[in-house]
Amino acid sequence: MAWFTPDFNRFFKELAANNNKDWFDANRERYEHSVKKPFEVFVAEVIARVAKVDPQVRIEPKEAIFRINRDVRFSRDKIPYKLNRSAIVSPAGRKDHGIPGIYFQLGPEAVEFYGGAYMPDKGELHRIRERITKDLRKFRTLREAPVFVDHFGTVQGEVNKVLPAEFKAAAAKEPLLFNKQFYYGAQLPARTVTDLKLADILMEHYAAMGGMNRFLLG
């Protein structure tokens, strides 16, 4: 049995054309049945599987799942609802996006998996750069490993124009030290959401990012 029915993606396709509170309220029961509850069950399964690999993961689904409501307080775009469901499974869950784990997003555009440090604070960014500088060979081995490249391509992130002096020499050999983010991801077809092996596919990507996640976490 699949984790999600075709109505999961169909709900979001219809929401895209009717993104307002009245439509959402009229379809709330459908949302609960086809989207919210199945996603909570799926996230619980992912947490259980990841915890077997990383015992530090001891969170509940509610600590991992992002709200469907968009934060429109400082945005010109006042559309109220996101067109996907997403969660991050890590020791900190959604409270700290800088701690490596696995972020996943399911919707009618794609099924997406991401790892790494997406929003490290200043202190953690400094520590990540220190780890890379101290072991350039290991970092390169991890990012060039066939399993990593096959699943994610490369390490991504916004780039700083200026680096602290202590990292400049190493950056000549490893330009990724200029990054202020260190993340990597994969996009799969939207039909993957109804795949019977969705949890297995997610864990395959989690395993592929495991070495790099552990290196960045230190």
Image (spheres, grey):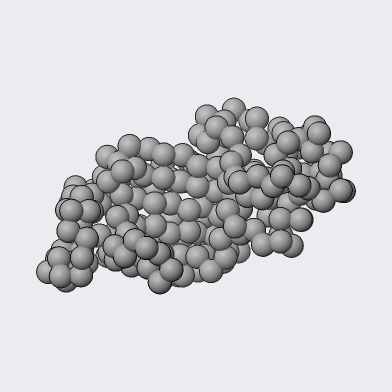
Residue at 34%, 42% in the rendered image: 110
Residue at 63%, 49% in the rendered image: 181
Residue at 65%, 35% in the rendered image: 143
Tell me if 204 is positioned left or right of 92 in this view.
Answer: left
Where is residue 65 drawn, in percent x and y? 41, 64
* Quarter of the figure with the C terminus: bottom right
Give the answer, above or below, for where 153 lies relative to 97.
above
Where is residue 124 drawn, in percent x and y? 71, 59
Where is residue 127 drawn, in percent x and y? 76, 56
Where is residue 104 drawn, in percent x and y? 43, 51
Residue at 87%, 48% in the rendered image: 166
Quadrant in the picture for residue 209: top right
Asked whether the viewer can see residue 31, the reply is: yes
Give the answer, above or below, for where 71 lies relative to 209.
below
Q: Residue furthest front?
A: 76
Q: In the depicted view, which residue is nearer to us: 5 or 178? A: 178
Tell me if 146 is positioned left or right of 38 in this view.
Answer: right
Q: In the depicted view, which residue is nearer to us: 126 or 62? A: 126
Tell me if 4 is positioned left or right of 141 in this view.
Answer: left
Asked whether the viewer can see residue 147, the reply is: no
